[in-house]
Image (cartoon, rainbow, N blue to C red):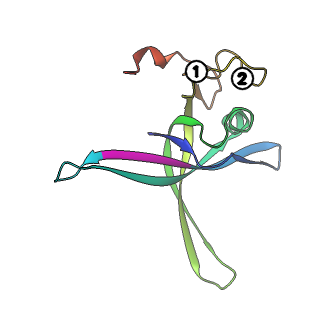
Amino acid sequence: MLIGNLGKDPDVQFLEGNIAVAKFPLATTETFKDRSGKLVSQTEWHTVVLWRGLAELAQKYLHKSSLVYIEGRLRTRSWDDKDGNRKFATEVVGDNLIMLDKRMDSPTAPPSGENGGETLGNSDSPIGDPSENLPF
């Protein structure tokens, strides 16, 4: 489970069979006090991959700096680069997405049920409004 901001707009591609896949960097920041009482922030970058309906939603509604909650699993893949060196990448494959940005009353805002804290999973069906339980 991650809560963070997109580092850039989602890169969406369509594979054979018109299957959408979106990829974007997500920054998560942890703030804590060190031994001297000074506030310290640490930012980690994660590569997030969304498939099918979630990828299409990302393409339509997410943009650089969007605040999202992502629930998923880690996947590590490997390949050989052009020089024959073995490379590895670990990605977060998202299973659920909650858009945490405030709703905007504009023509480009998503319809009710696709933003403002609605939960969207691989089935693309809203399953509740968790914003009522948020502490802020």
- Given the image, on which type of amino acid does mark 2 rest? Ala
Across and down, in percent, residue 11 comes to: 72, 49
Across and down, in percent, residue 92 comes to: 53, 49
> Which residue is labeled 1 in the image?
116
Kindly identify the residue that appears in the image at 59 percent across and 26 percent down: 120
Where residue 94 sits, quadrant-wise, is top right
Across and down, in percent, residue 74 comes to: 49, 51
Q: Which residues are magenta?
A: 26-31
Kindly identify the residue that appears in the image at 56 percent across and 37 percent down: 95
Rate crowding at label 2 as few (under 14), some (14 to 19) or many (20 or more) other CA atoms within 10 Å: few
Kindly identify the residue that appears in the image at 16 percent across and 53 percent down: 35
Where the N terminus falls, by quadrant? top left
Rate crowding at label 1 as few (under 14), some (14 to 19) or many (20 or more) other CA atoms within 10 Å: some
Residue 80, numbered label:
none
Residue 109, numbered label:
2
Work out whether 123 lies above or below 50. above
Q: Which of the pair 105/58 is nearer the observer?
A: 105
The majority secondary structure of the magenta stretch comes to strand
Across and down, in percent, residue 111 comes to: 71, 17
The secondary structure type at the circle numbered 1 is: loop
